[in-house]
Amino acid sequence: MGDTGAVPLRGQASPGTASRPRITAVAGVSPNGGVSRSGTPLRRVQQIRPQAPSHGVVATLLALAGLAWLSLWVWAASPYGRYLHHEGVPGSLALEIGLFDLGWVLMIVAMMLPSSVPLVLTFAALVGRRRTPGTLVVLLLAGYLVVWAGFGLAAWVMDRGIHATVDAVPWLAEHPQLIIGATLLIVGLEYLPALALGPVADALL
């Protein structure tokens, strides 16, 4: 029989085209341009693929991590190595906070930044075709370090609060296991909302 001109139903492929991907024009847009069934010209949309980042991004991140390790090693071996610990620093409170946070950020760059290389590479690939992709990557890293620096400041405040409490209550100094247990309990309680809401989030997604 000849061609009857029948239009295949949605989801079905016409004979001889089973192996071809079906391309649908949506809202006047077509990957290849052309004319719609109603005769309206379709815009041709250029498919933009993420640009692969150069190896320079990886080399730069690893170099930063190596430089941070070297800085920590030199700092710890110097007479100022005590500033890297949680001990009090002689001088102003601003100096103590600044030195602790600086050491914290260096440790983050040395130990945490290498594990974030896939994130940075993905972001660099997504913004690779922008006008200033390098600037955007730098802003990403700056935001990353600012967040970790804020967390380090919060950790410093908590540490000083614990030391002040122990100094005020000698009984706690005689039972340090209570402080360790309470710290682990607080960290565990932090994950309870995520565990409780996990099934709800899975159902919604």
Image (spheres, grey):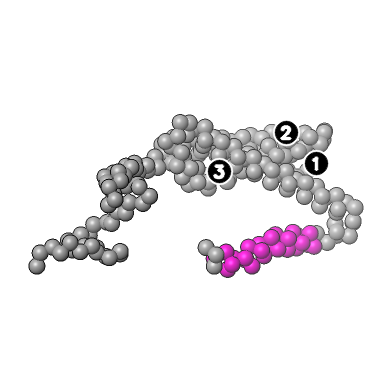
Query: Is residue 178 highlighted in magenta?
Result: yes
According to the image, label 2 marks what residue? 79
Whether residue 75 is visible here, answered yes or no, is: yes
- The quarter of the picture where residue 52 lies is top left
Answer with left or right where residue 31 lies relative to residue 135: left
Residue range corresponding to the magenta coloring: 177-202
Answer with left or right where residue 22 lies relative to residue 170: left
Most foreground residue, 139 or 54: 139
Provide the major secondary structure of the magenta segment. Answer: helix
Most foreground residue, 50 or 145: 50
Q: Nearer the viewer, mark 2 or mark 3?
A: 3
Q: Is residue 92 above or below residue 179?
A: above
Within-10-Å neighbours for mark 2: few <14, some 14–19, many 20+? few
Q: Amino acid at mark 1?
A: Gly
Q: Amino acid at mark 3?
A: Leu
Q: Which mark is residue 113?
A: 3
Relative image position of residue 181 (x, y in whole percent): 75, 63
According to the image, label 1 marks what residue? 88
Q: Residue at x 63, y 63 (%)?
A: 194
